[in-house]
Amino acid sequence: MGRITLTVAVAVLAATSVAACHDQHTIEGTRSHTLTVGGKRMKANLSPTGGANEFDLLVVRDDIVINPDPASERERGQEAASRIMGEVCKVKGLKPQVLDDRLVQQLNYYVRFRCV
């Protein structure tokens, strides 16, 4: 009887954990960069938008996060995005200009930027 109860408890815990997790989003056709921000591994997916010197950047945590803190995730996402945008624009001798940014599912940081 105890073994069945333990099995049920593990199954309930696993189901609850999966329900509280957030999926990672990616942008198709991207180049991916891995970096560390605040001790957390982040993956930055970069793709051109088709506009002149314009890019989409999606920064995602490179691990499973349960009950993320949106303020902390935004801060880490902004730091990672700032590094990537700086590197991309520096190659062309330009500076990044943010056109749009937002936090996706309380975890992933999206930014569209242009090098000017």
Image (cartoon, grey):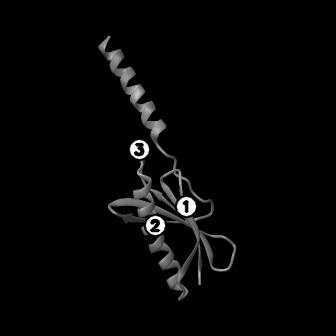
Q: Earlier in the sequence, mark 2 or mark 1?
A: 2
Residue at the disc numbered 1? 102
Question: For mark 2, what is the residue?
Answer: 78
Q: Say which residue appears at 39% left-offset and 21% top-offset.
A: 8
Q: Amino acid at mark 3?
A: Ile
- Residue 59: x and y in percent read 49, 62
Separation of residues labelled 2 and 1 (CA atoms): 10 Å
| Vertical placement of residue 89 versus 40, above or below | below
Foreground residue among 27 and 112: 112
Label 1, secondary structure: give it.
Answer: strand
Q: Nearer the viewer, residue 79 or 12?
A: 79
Q: Earlier in the sequence, mark 3 or mark 2?
A: 3
In this picture, is 68 found above or below 112? Answer: above
Whole-angstrom CA distance, mark 3 to mark 2, is 20 Å
Where, quadrant-wise, is the C terminus in this rendering?
bottom right
Q: Amino acid at mark 2?
A: Gln
Q: Residue at x 46, y 73 (%)?
A: 82
Q: Quadrant for residue 70, please give it.
A: bottom left
**Going from the N terminus, do you reach mark 3 or mark 1 first?**
3
Q: Secondary structure at mark 3?
A: loop
